[in-house]
Structure formats: structure tokens, C-alpha cells
């Protein structure tokens, strides 16, 4: 299993991707997956780069709070956030153990 940032050169793999969720399938096949204003898309591919196993799209943002100590309440940025905009796995791999992913999960647990 290979992980890399999604680029236009991987569009052929994306066209064959089916997760069972129409919106997530559309996302990876459309220009949205390449639009960095939405987020960055990362994919997992088979070793031969011919099949998309899954993908996720992430972006950053901030948390806001309200400072009520002033006469007019102010919105303040109080921290950072990571947004997971999309996460999908191909129907061909749903419910299956992928050794590389299983090893990563064991390491992180």
C-alpha cells in the first residue's frame, strides 16, 4: 500500500473508485479533490499504482471564542483545528485487513 498526495496523474484510478457513497465517489472524481482551497487530498494505492484503496481530504481551521470582557463582544481565534472533509474506502477493501494499515493501527494504539 502506497500513500501519496492526490494529483491529476491519478485521475484514472479515481474514475474507477467506488465506495458506496455517491458524494464521496463524486468528490474524488471531480476537481474538488484537487482544489487546495477545500483541502489536500491524500490517497492510498495498491503497490502497482493501478487501484485506489481509499482517500481522505484534510484542511486546517481555527476555533473561535467570544471575549465578553469588553463592551462589544469580540470574536477571537483561540486555537487550531484539523478538518477531515472526506474519508472513504473502496468497496473492494471495506471490511478487509490490510497488513500495512493494521501495523500502523497497532503502532498508534
Image (cartoon, rainbow, N blue to C red):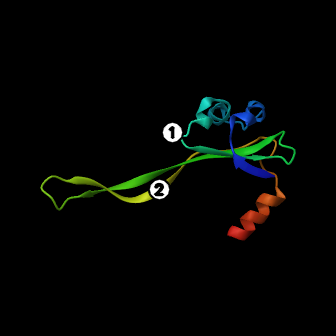
- Please tell me in which quadrant of the rendered image residue 70 appears: bottom left
Identified at 71% across, 48% down, the residue is 4
In the image, residue 14 lies at what x, y percent?
Answer: 73, 34
Above or below, 101 against 30 in this view is: below
Quadrant including the C terminus: bottom right
Label 2 environment density (alpha carbons within 10 Å; few <14, some 14–19, many ≥20): few
- Between 27 and 3, the one nearer to me in the picture: 3
Residue picked out by circle 1: 37
Q: Which mark is residue 18?
A: none
Residue 84 appears left or right of 101: left
Residue 10 appears left or right of 37: right
How many marks do you count on the picture?
2
The span from disc 2 to disc 1 (Cα, nearest Å) is 16 Å
Above or below, 91 against 79 in this view is: above
Identified at 78% across, 62% down, the residue is 102
Identified at 82% across, 55% down, the residue is 98
Residue picked out by circle 2: 81
Residue 57 shows in this picture:
yes
Q: Secondary structure under badge 2?
A: strand
Residue 18 shows in this picture:
no
Amino acid at each position: 500500500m502506497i500513500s501519496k498526495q492526490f494529483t491529476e496523474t491519478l485521475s484514472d484510478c479515481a474514475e474507477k473508485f467506488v465506495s458506496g457513497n455517491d458524494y464521496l465517489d463524486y468528490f474524488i472524481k471531480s476537481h474538488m479533490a484537487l482544489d487546495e482551497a477545500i483541502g489536500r487530498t491524500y490517497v492510498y494505492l495498491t503497490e502497482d499504482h493501478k487501484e485506489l484503496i481509499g482517500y481522505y481530504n484534510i484542511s486546517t481551521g481555527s476555533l473561535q471564542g467570544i471575549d465578553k470582557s469588553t463592551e462589544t463582544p469580540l470574536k477571537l481565534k483561540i486555537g487550531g483545528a484539523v478538518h477531515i472533509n472526506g474519508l472513504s474506502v473502496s468497496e473492494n477493501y471495506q471490511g478487509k485487513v490490510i497488513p500495512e494499515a493494521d501495523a500502523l493501527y497497532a503502532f498508534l494504539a
